Amino acid sequence: MAQVVAVIASTHHPFYYRASTAVGEDRPPFADEWVAKIERFRETLTRARPDVLVMVGSDHFHQLWLDNMPQFLVGKAPVYDANWYNEEREFGLPRLRLEGHEELSSHILRGGLDSGFDLAFSNELRIDHSVTCPIITLRPEADLPIVPVYTNIFAPPLPQPSRFVELGRTLRALVESWPSDQRVAIIGTGHLSLELGGPRQFGPHGPDPEFDRKAVDWIASGDLTGCLGEVTLESLHAPGNATHGFMDFMLMMGVAGDGVRADHVDSLDLFHTMEAYFTWYPEGALA
Amino acid sequence: MSKYLLNKFLFTVDRDPELVERYRTEPEATVTWWEETQANRILGCIDDERSTWLAFTDEERRALREHDHVALFGMGAHPFLTLTLFIALFERDHPEPMSYQRGYAEALAHIALPYPDIAT
């Protein structure tokens, strides 16, 4: 069976690419520290020697739209073009082209449908920065096939937080039941406290540092009981109006497992949001 | 109230470089044209199979024509769509990094939790 060789959860910050490539006067003062943290984080994936990446993210109204909005969607295509005009315009993100892995997509779709998740699918998906940011930070060669998994953290009504956790557990079990000798890394990105388009946006730090501190502790220690005990669809409005993206971190906690401590934990307090990076190595992954 | 239609305007304009410029320079004409010809288009369908029922209220039309992001927030337009499009429209007029975004937030400072519902 396939082996999960790394579970990785991260924020996805669309400004990283521009900050890390800027030189001279254009280079922000925090860029060097940010790049150093990202390079250490990248090494945690490299060490796991993955063959395939399952990438969990959330479309930001690029291809998925309110006339036909899936809650959980799996891409099944041989190729994914990536990044959109408005992401090039606002963030300077480059266009990318990533190979797909249709066999693993099919396995996840069939297995998901048979275990309680009525997953939507897409045979032609242009992916956005929720997936390309971790490609840029963790695997800038963009040389591994991917299976994109999109969640709706963006357009209410949203699934409950417990469903994100359960989908994470299911994804882990499905990858481990895939009859293959491939080494699979499961990577997901979300947010800690975040406000976009509201009065608390772009402050000197994230809108709710206390939530961020608790969130990092929950993720680092795999404390799903504590996290699910406090986090609801309603409670996530308080730390910032885009904080429902934290549910993608909860999904990744489900992938990593109840009570499993992360092997790599790092964070960076940026002007308007806290960045956070986590890697778990399942037993035997680095053998 | 049609939060959906407000979002559809923001979504379809934001993804089209030509429409972004038209909406920046000729907001009244662009909103009028869009409501007459685009509001009822079902994305991915031919023109003949358009919807028959979508229209802005007077206040929605006014907010879009006047680039009034505070009113759009109050009406429950999706804040990510509004922010992304308005950065494309106006950040270029504010050369200091993030100064447009901070001013955008300050204009909303009177709004307390709970924010207007954005569910559609």
Image (tube, rainbow, N blue to C red):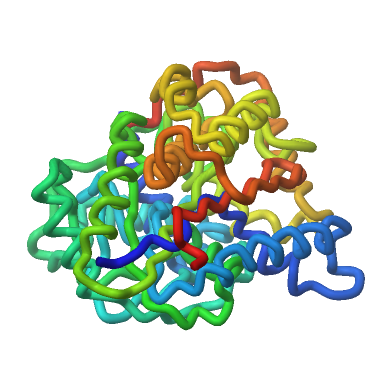
Quadrant housing the C terminus of chain B: top left
Would residue B6 be visible to someone looking at this image? Answer: yes
For image coordinates 33% across by 54% down, the residue present is A150
Which quadrant of the figure has residue B118?
A: top left
* In-image side of A70 versus A154 (left or right): left
Check the picture and name the quadrant holding the N terminus of chain B. top left
Q: Which residue is more in the foreground, A171 or A56?
A: A171
Tell me, yes or no, if residue B29 can be seen here: no
Front-lying residue, A42 or A262: A262
Res. A140 image quadrant: bottom right
- The percent coordinates of residue B43 (x first, y second) are 22, 60
Q: Position of residue A99 (x, y in %)?
A: 36, 81
Q: Is residue A253 left or right of residue B97?
A: left
* Residue B118, placed above or below residue A36: above
Residue A214, percent from left and from top: 61, 26
Question: Viewer-proximal residue, A135 or A156?
Answer: A135
The residue drawn where x is 70% and y is 68% is A18
Identify the residue at the far right of this view. Answer: A25
- Picture coordinates of residue B9 (x, y %)? 38, 50
Q: Nearer the viewer, residue A270 or A183?
A: A183
Q: Is residue B16 left or right of residue A206?
A: left
